[in-house]
Amino acid sequence: MVQEALVQLRGVSKNYSEGERERLVLKDATLEISRGEWLFLLGKSGSGKSTLLNLVSGIDLPEHGEILIEGRPINRLSERERTLFRREKIGFIFQSYNLIPTLTVAENLLLPLELLGELTRQRRAEGLALLEQVGLADRAQSYPDRLSGGEQQRVAIARALVHRPLLLLADEPTGNLDADTGREVLELFERLLRPTACTLVLVTHSSEVARLADRLCRIRDGHLEETTLAPGALV
């Protein structure tokens, strides 16, 4: 049975200016990502992995080509339309957690619902139940600076999922964590995401993380290519 494509890149190219020079990050990238698929991106630092996440989310726009999510060309939307689309359809997890320091754990968690105008009593209860699933119900009123790195990343995962996104984008989610804490975060991905239809696109340098992927792609010299996992060959 052919899986329906959630994300499609068609001939996407992206350059960045470096002084008077233009640096090619992606050249004529074409890719389809199915609903529910876990696609992980590999490549050297600066190869364009994070840029690809930004393009898929509509934060960046390509110089050439088209990016479709659910058949909708997001690069043709206005900036306001892209912002609303991200809020509704996409969840983000960052290497540096990106929690707002002046908000409590619960407030950080529920922020996506508040921005969508969906912070009803029921959705609040569901969000706090998600906090319990990541083992932090007792830290709901704590501030981020009182949490360990692993705890902050668990809050970030819960926040990324609280609005039930179609697509989750994760940029090195275990990159700032020690090995044991990183494994705990991976177990959360398996437990919270695998039972859902949420599609995951994740950037990693870790062979342990990469083994969880349904499919691997490598970015090299501006080109996007499918690859297989070879020990010690993730860059």
Image (cartoon, rainbow, N blue to C red):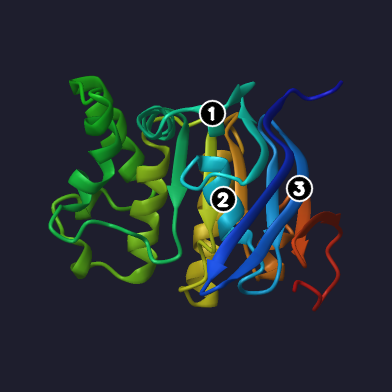
Residue where numbered disc 3 is placed: 29
Residue where numbered disc 1 is placed: 76
Residue 216 or 10: which is nearer the viewer?
A: 10
The N terminus appears in which quarter of the rendering? top right
Residue 125's mark?
none
Q: Of the residues shown, which amino acid type is indicated by label 2? A: Leu
Q: Is residue 68 above or below residue 37?
A: above
Residue where numbered disc 2 is placed: 53
| Sequence-wise first label, 2 or 1 | 2
Q: Residues within 10 Å of mark 3 (few under 14, many from 20)?
A: many
Q: Quadrant of residue 21?
A: bottom right
Quote the CA–CA distance across marks 2 and 1: 17 Å
Q: Is residue 180 above or below residue 120?
A: below
Residue 227 or 47: which is nearer the viewer?
A: 47
Image point (24%, 32%), residue name: 115
Asked whether the viewer can see residue 70, the reply is no
Mark 2 or 1: the one toward you: 1
x, y (%) of residue 20? 55, 73
Q: Quadrant of residue 81?
A: top left
Q: Secondary structure at mark 1?
A: helix
Image point (25%, 67%), residue name: 147
Residue 207 or 84: which is nearer the viewer?
A: 84
x, y (%) of residue 140? 19, 50
Is 223 on the left or on the right of 170, as rendered? right
Contact? badges 3 and 1 (CB < 8 Å): no
Quote the CA–CA distance across marks 3 and 2: 13 Å
Mark 3 or 2: the one toward you: 3
